[in-house]
Amino acid sequence: MTVKDAVAKRFLMLCQQRGICPNELANRAGVTPSTVYSMLDPSRQQISITTIKKLCDGLEITLGNFFSCALFDDLEQELQ
């Protein structure tokens, strides 16, 4: 799993836990729905830390809390 895949999966998990859809996450974070759907799209390769921070703010969690998840513990090395 890549870092980007783990980030997308983590946001999906958090949305499910809170009972919200990606559109609601976008509204709470003050970003466009297309930003969230681009982040979730497996064919997109990058997501900025600024976008991750905005989405975390929308969920009222810290970046530390977001990345404190087993998904990020055993990621493959990114060689690009």
Image (cartoon, rainbow, N blue to C red):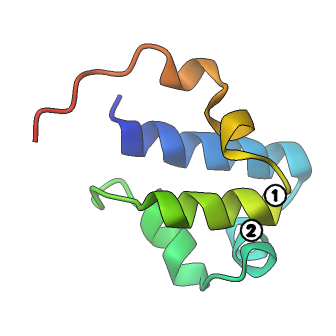
Residue at the top extreme, as displayed: 74
Q: Quadrant of the N terminus?
A: top left
Please report the residue visible at 42 percent of the width from the left and 62 percent of the height from the top: 48
Relative image position of residue 69 (x, y in whole percent): 65, 24
Up-down relation of residue 79 to residue 63 (above or below): above
| Quadrant in which residue 26 is drawn | bottom right
Relative image position of residue 60 (x, y in whole percent): 85, 56
Relative image position of residue 75 (x, y in whole percent): 37, 21
Which residue occupies the foreground of this view, 24 or 73?
73
| Quadrant in which residue 22 is drawn | bottom right
Q: Which residue is mark 2?
A: 25
Q: Which residue is mark 1?
A: 59
Kindly report which numbered mark, 1 or 2, lies closer to the viewer in this rendering. 1
Up-down relation of residue 60 to residue 73 (above or below): below
Q: Is residue 12 left or right of residue 18?
A: left
Within 10 angstroms of label 1, few (less than 14), some, or many (20 or more) residues?
A: some
SS for tag 2?
helix
Please report the residue visible at 52 percent of the width from the left and 48 percent of the height from the top: 8
SS for tag 1?
helix
Q: Is residue 53 left or right of residue 2?
A: right
Do tag 1 and tag 2 residues touch (Cβ < 8 Å)? yes
Please report the residue visible at 79 percent of the width from the left and 66 percent of the height from the top: 58
Relative image position of residue 2 (x, y in whole percent): 33, 34
Within 10 angstroms of label 2, few (less than 14), some, or many (20 or more) residues?
A: many
Residue at the left extreme, as displayed: 80
Label 1 to label 2: alpha-carbon separation:
7 Å
Which residue occupies the foreground of this view, 64 or 2?
64
